[in-house]
Structure formats: structure tokens, C-alpha cells
Amino acid sequence: MAYSALASISDFSKYNLDEITSLAQNMEMKIHLNGMYKTVQWSDDETSLTVEYHLDGRFHRIVEEIWKESKQTFAR
């Protein structure tokens, strides 16, 4: 079983913000404008994923991934 709805995505650069948002409908989503980027955080009971997108919705980078149950944080 996947940790989250986003766990099956191996290459976020193939998806824009709208496409990822539609895949993560059951996750809480917060968006912060950060200069040239939108910083988006999706979270549920198992995981938290923070990703930066260009203002037009193109992927920029994964900032952080947290696996809550195993208390592992992956900062990039």
C-alpha cells in the first residue's frame, strides 16, 4: 500500500501543479507564494510533501518529504 496518493509518482517534472492537485484530492493542501515560486504542501495521516512550482504551475523542485509513521524526513 502506498504511503500517499502521491507515492506512485516517480518523476514530478512530468506533471504540472493542476495535474498533481487532481491526484491528491484526499490530501490537505496549503499554498504559499514565495517570490518566483508557489510552495505547495500536501499532507495526510501518513505523509507530508512540500514542492515548489513556478508561478505558471510548472514543477521546480521537491523541497521536503516526511514519512510520519517512521519519523523520516527527506530534505532536498
Image (spheres, rainbow, N blue to C red):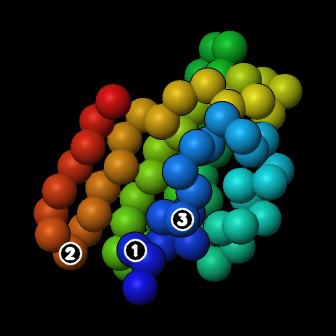
Residue 59 drawn at (x, y percent)? 67, 31
Q: Which mark is residue 67?
A: none
Report how many numbered discs are placed on residues in the image. Answer: 3
Examine the image and state in which quarter residue 6 appears: bottom right
Placement of the N terminus among the 4 image quadrants = bottom left
Q: Which residue is mark 2?
A: 69
Q: Which residue is mark 1?
A: 3
Mark 3 is surrounded, within 10 Å at the Cα level, by few (under 14), some (14 to 19) or many (20 or more) other residues, namely few
Q: Tag 3: residue type? A: Ser
**Residue at screen point 43% across, 77% down:** 2
**Residue at screen point 36% across, 49% down:** 65
Q: Tag 1: residue type? A: Tyr
Q: Which residue is mark 3?
A: 8
Q: Earlier in the sequence, mark 2 or mark 1?
A: 1
- Pick the front one: 55 or 59: 59
Residue occupying the far front of the picture: 10
Secondary structure of the residue carrying tag 2 is: loop
Q: Earlier in the sequence, mark 1 or mark 3?
A: 1
**27 sits to left or right of 17:** left
Q: Tag 2: residue type? A: Glu
Residue 11 drawn at (x, y percent)? 58, 43
**18 sits to left or right of 60:** right
Question: Can the viewer see residue 8?
Answer: yes
